Amino acid sequence: MSNESITRHRRGIGGGLAFVVSGPSGAGKNSVIDRVMEELSGLSYSVSYTTRPPRPHEIPGRDYHFISKEEFERLIAAGELVEHVRYLGDYYGTGIRQIEEVFARGEDVILNIDVQGAKTLRKKGLSHFSVVYVFLAPSSLARLEERLRARGTEDEEEIRARLAVAAQELEEIPEFDYLVINDDLERAVEELSGIVIAERARIVG
Ligand code: 5GP
């Protein structure tokens, strides 16, 4: 009897899957991602670079690599970022090294990026790795507004700006592979976990 591995037919065997979780600011991407990472093994978070100042509860190196505008521009010039955006006056970007390190460990990576960044990645791809695009949003703009106000990390002007950006971002939903509605955290966690599990079980074509 041949001892050939049957699981090798599954896409999720040696890592190398990238889950891009995108959607408007305030959609709850961080909370949903944190919970999914607690529940599933073999998933690593890609910590982005940003020039925005840390919020009180944020930890450098865990939530973001907080760097200066000059340092960020150096990373762009050195080709160290797979994508970057300027969002409401600050830079945000994804480092190629972080992703490669996760894949080298045989794990899958989860990226929390804005809709524009997801669009750039879709155009460029991530060399020979598979990328799954997930859009996460509450069920309406009114709910998003409630969430942003409840979060209390932005002033009125910033909330208005984020809502205006969000209205445009919703237009991009048809470009994504999956839509997760986050009105209820438990439900959203279940849905995103389900997507990761299903994609890992997909047969390599
Ligand atoms: P916040 O300031 O609320 O942490 O993030 C603002 C927006 O930037 C969020 O929608 C977040 O997903 C996005 N973002 C965070 N990191 C990156 C990144 O590396 N690239 C891109 N394109 N967007 C990012």
Image (cartoon, helix red, strand yellow):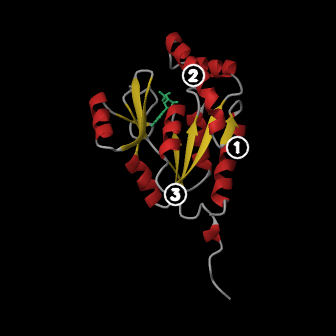
Label 1 secondary element: helix
Residue placed at 68% from the left, 38% from the top?
A: 179
Q: CA distance from mark 1 to mark 2?
A: 23 Å
Q: Which mark is residue 34?
A: none
Residue that badge 2 annotates: 151
Residue that badge 1 annotates: 191
Q: CA distance from mark 3 to mark 2?
A: 34 Å
First along the sequence among labels 1 and 3: 3
Q: Nearer the viewer, mark 3 or mark 2?
A: 3
- The x and y percentages for residue 200 are 63, 58
First along the sequence among labels 1 and 2: 2
- The x and y percentages for residue 119 are 53, 37
Residue that badge 3 annotates: 16
Q: Quadrant of the C terminus?
A: bottom right
Q: Nearer the viewer, mark 1 or mark 3?
A: 3
Q: Quadrant of the N terminus?
A: bottom right
Name the quadrant containing residue 79: top left
In the image, residue 132 sits, relative to residue 11, either above or below, namely above
Label 3 secondary element: loop
Q: What amino acid type should be assigned to the residue bearing mark 2? A: Arg
Ligand 1 under 8 Å from disc 3 Cβ: no
Q: What amino acid type should be assigned to the residue bearing mark 1? A: Glu
Q: CA distance from mark 1 to mark 3?
A: 21 Å
